[in-house]
Amino acid sequence: MANDKKGKKPSNVVPLPNLPARLLEKGMASLKAKHYKESLSCFLQLLELDPGHPQGHLGVVLSLIELGQLQEAKTRAERMLKQGIGEYFDVLQIYLSILIQLSEYETVVSVVEAVLGEHQLPAAQAESFYQLLHFSRKMAEDPEPGVDFTPEPAEDRKQEIETLRSMLTSSEIHNQWIAMQQLSYMDPEETLSVYREFLANEEGHPGIKTMALNYLKSKNVEETVTLHKFGQMYSISIQELHDVYEEPFNLEVKKEVEDRLEQENPTLSQFALTIWWDYILAIYPQVPEPADQFFWSQALQCAAGKLSGMDACEELQSDIEIHPETLKKAVDQLLDIERFTFGPNKF
């Protein structure tokens, strides 16, 4: 007995209560704040504690994608699909996006064909996969449209543009994103009508529309376009668009959030700023109302707390002179857009 006691040292490791939940929260906040090495570390630690945690696996894959480690992300996403970890179609969309970034279009074709053959899909979802299948077959035949400057037949180019136009009407955000990426390789004079149609379409994703506006501005397109976002129609002069990251008010809100939260809770501060930029990019080129950086810093603190599972709203009640309903409306706006912007790859 004495020898047993000598040979077995007491453990100095004290398990923290709710550690998996804390790692998930910190990983999500780091991922959304674009601190990808930190998010990867958190999700890997989470999987050490709970090897089957679906959100942990998904977080690792998303972090690897952002870090450019696409082969490892691909391997892990394949494993998730084979082992049935996570929501199948959410993981499948991420897996297909990785394959497209790796230009593995033949694999995309085989995977999508298998999905269409094995699953009875709703009409809208089936149409989305057929669009992706058509696009990937075309890319498998001509894998580098942005690098090969050899003129292609006018009919082929026209067909490709029409395929991308159709993908922009898809209800799947990843199809819109793929189409926008491919359009950026083309002459804007050939594709301006596609951009016009997409920007005016009420169904298009607001973040993808911001990508389109910024691309047209970067190409010095001197046009006025109709923009539809959140039920509102606007007439937009491309060359009069502002740089969202240099707008003084947006930077004032950023500073207010940092001054308020950075020292006390840096993770919450990072999360709040991520929500802010997601919101600004979604409503762009409109500006937030009211133009009060203190008001928005309060709303962001509350929204970040809600998404992190913290009650960061209660402590604001004695700190502000804003009507609670006004603040609640702003918080709801932030939350609605954040959930919509984060898309199907939710935790």
Image (cartoon, rainbow, N blue to C red):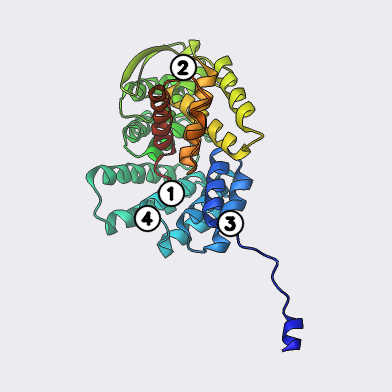
In the rendered image, the vertical position of residue 96 relative to residue 145, given as above or below: below
Q: Position of residue 1 (x, y in %)?
A: 71, 89
Mark 1, mark 3: which one is toward the viewer?
Answer: 3
Which element is circle 4 on? helix
Q: Is residue 173 left or right of residue 245?
A: left
Local packing at callout 2 (Cα closer than 10 Å; few below 14, some 14-19, many 20+) is some
Q: Tell us which disc is closer to us: 1 or 2.
A: 2
Q: Which residue is mark 2?
A: 287
Residue found farthest to the front: 318
Which mark is on residue 96?
1
Give the spatial CA distance, label 1 vs label 2: 35 Å
Q: Where is residue 191, by image quadrant?
A: top left
Mark 3 → mark 2, Cα distance in angstroms:
39 Å
Along the line of sight, the residue nearer the viewer: 231 or 1: 1
Residue contact between numbered discs 3 and 2, judged by CB atoms under 8 Å? no
Q: Which comes before the other along the chain, label 4 or label 2?
A: 4
Q: Which residue in the protein does label 3 denote?
A: 44
Looking at the image, do the residues carrying marks 1 and 2 touch, with CB atoms under 8 Å apart? Answer: no
Q: Position of residue 111 (x, y in %)?
A: 38, 55
Q: Are marks 3 and 4 in contact (CB under 8 Å)?
A: no
| Amino acid type at mark 4 | Tyr
Would residue 168 be found to the left or right of residue 312 on screen?
A: left
Q: Amino acid at mark 2?
A: Val
Q: CA distance from mark 1 to mark 3?
A: 23 Å
Q: Which residue is mark 4?
A: 88
Residue 288, percent across and down? 46, 18
Q: Earlier in the sequence, mark 4 or mark 1?
A: 4
Q: Residues within 10 Å of mark 3 (few under 14, many from 20)?
A: some
Which residue is found at the position 22% from the left and 45% from the top? 123
